[in-house]
Image: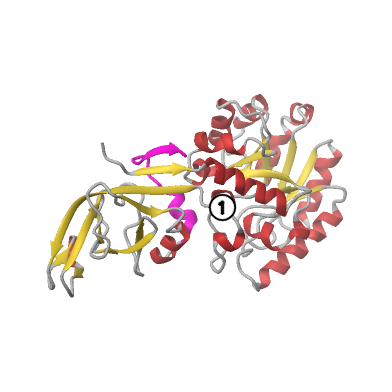
């Protein structure tokens, strides 16, 4: 059987959740499990996250999967509902919604009494300069005050556009707008910290924090590693060597013959490719690891195979190769690919085997 495998480390996931608790000890934790738990698999991750206060998802379908698996924590739909009829499921399954435009507000108000009776919070999204979702000021103040007057329990919510950037001017603008609205709507619960903000601005943790990528052991920062942040990679992605070749100087490898050996080499073929979610294009040199030792990926990544330099390792057939994980960090693979760890994790295909460690 082909041995391309994704291992999910439950202990690492629990460790990262505990890091959030250390960094935000007074806030409730809304663990973000959208996009199939950032590609890790909701079903595999929820047991390790069972002590979280709540979950955050992008849409109704993701919330219903959590309920089907038996978890009863509050769930927030961070993009709100997409049609009026989804309010029926919101009420049936006790889901909390974000409202970020007037139509969503109208859909909510049509079920005001039932929503309030279930003691569900309304998360009201502030557009403080990111310009994706949310009400701008001063409109949001009127929205919140009207909801409170109607008896709703509200959470003021915002998302930072540049929390991973040290000195971006929009950070202060967003902070100040959020604090101004919070003061104008006082008393109100508040939530604005994603993974990067949890590390950077503990004074903004308020009532709820929303960790995402840090739970899965990838860094929200380009200039700080998971080791520096004291979080642990949750996913290890491996495959096996299925062929060994010797090539001489001047011979090429793979599609397009883009790699030409400048000396005699031993190479190994690994059964993995972009059909599994391994990235194809590498503007910078990429590596894999074998028993903790790094070695070059050479030639083009194909749908099902890659070639690696085996000259100094002499790894035999069947050797396990780490594509990313604890030795070769997903953030480093992403950097070589010209992207971010989030993308590589989220675009994993269903093809590799999945196992809990």
Residue 321 placement, left or right of 333: left
Considering only vertical position in the picture, is 351 above or below 24?
A: above
Q: Nearer the viewer, residue 121 or 278?
A: 278
Question: What colour-coding does the image apply?
Answer: secondary structure
Picture residue at 42% right of the left edge, 37% below the top: 355
Q: Is 289 drawn above or below residue 166 in the view shown? A: above
Q: Position of residue 26 (x, y in %)?
A: 79, 48
Stretch of the chain drawn in magenta:
340-357
Query: Foreground residue, 117 or 306?
Result: 306
Residue 354, visible in the rendered structure: yes
Disc 1 crowd, CA 10 A, few/some/many (<14, 14-19, 20+): many
The residue lying at 24 percent from left, 61 percent from top is 310
Q: Residue 91: x percent and y percent?
A: 67, 27
Q: Image height check: is 322 above or below 172?
A: above
Q: Is residue 344 magenta?
A: yes
The picture places residue 331, in percent across and down from the top left corner, at 47, 60
Residue at image location 84% in from the left, 41% down from the top: 148
Q: Quadrant of the N terminus?
A: top left
Image point 53% across, 66% down: which residue? 222
Give the image quarter of residue 54: top right
For label 1, the residue is: 213
Quarter holding residue 70: top right
SS assignment at label 1:
helix
């Amino acid at each position: 059987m082909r041995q391309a495998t994704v291992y999910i480390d439950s202990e690492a996931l629990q460790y990262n959740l505990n890091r959030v608790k250390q960094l935000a000890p007074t806030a409730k934790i809304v663990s973000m499990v959208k996009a199939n738990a950032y590609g890790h698999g909701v079903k595999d991750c929820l047991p390790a996250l069972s002590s979280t206060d709540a979950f955050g998802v992008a849409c109704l379908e993701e919330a219903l999967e959590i309920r089907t698996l038996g978890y009863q924590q509050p769930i927030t739909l961070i993009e709100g509902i997409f049609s009026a009829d989804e309010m029926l499921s919101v009420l049936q399954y006790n889901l909390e919604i974000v409202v970020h435009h007037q139509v969503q507000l109208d859909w909510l108000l049509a079920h005001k009494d039932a929503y309030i009776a279930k003691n569900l919070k309304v998360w009201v999204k502030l557009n403080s300069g990111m310009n994706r979702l949310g009400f701008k000021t001063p409109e949001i103040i009127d929205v919140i005050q009207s909801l409170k007057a109607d008896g709703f329990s509200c959470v003021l919510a915002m998302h930072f556009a540049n929390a991973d950037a040290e000195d971006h001017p929009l950070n202060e603008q967003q902070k100040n707008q959020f604090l101004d609205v919070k003061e104008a709507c006082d008393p109100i619960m508040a939530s604005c910290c994603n993974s990067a903000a949890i590390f950077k601005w503990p004074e903004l943790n308020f009532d709820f924090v929303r960790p995402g990528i840090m739970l899965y052991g990838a860094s929200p920062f380009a200039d700080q590693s998971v080791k520096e942040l004291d979080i642990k990679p949750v996913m290890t992605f491996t495959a096996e060597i299925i062929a060994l070749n010797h090539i001489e100087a001047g011979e090429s490898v793979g599609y397009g013959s883009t790699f030409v050996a400048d000396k005699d080499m031993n190479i190994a073929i690994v059964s993995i490719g972009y059909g599994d979610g391994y990235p194809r294009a590498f503007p910078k040199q990429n590596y894999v690891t074998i028993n903790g030792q790094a070695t070059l990926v050479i030639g083009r990544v194909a749908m099902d195979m890659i070639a690696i330099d085996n000259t100094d390792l002499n790894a035999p057939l069947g050797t396990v190769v780490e594509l990313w994980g604890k030795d070769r960090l997903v953030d480093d693979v992403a950097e070589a690919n010209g992207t971010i760890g989030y993308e590589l994790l989220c675009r994993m295909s269903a093809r590799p085997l999945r196992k809990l460690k």
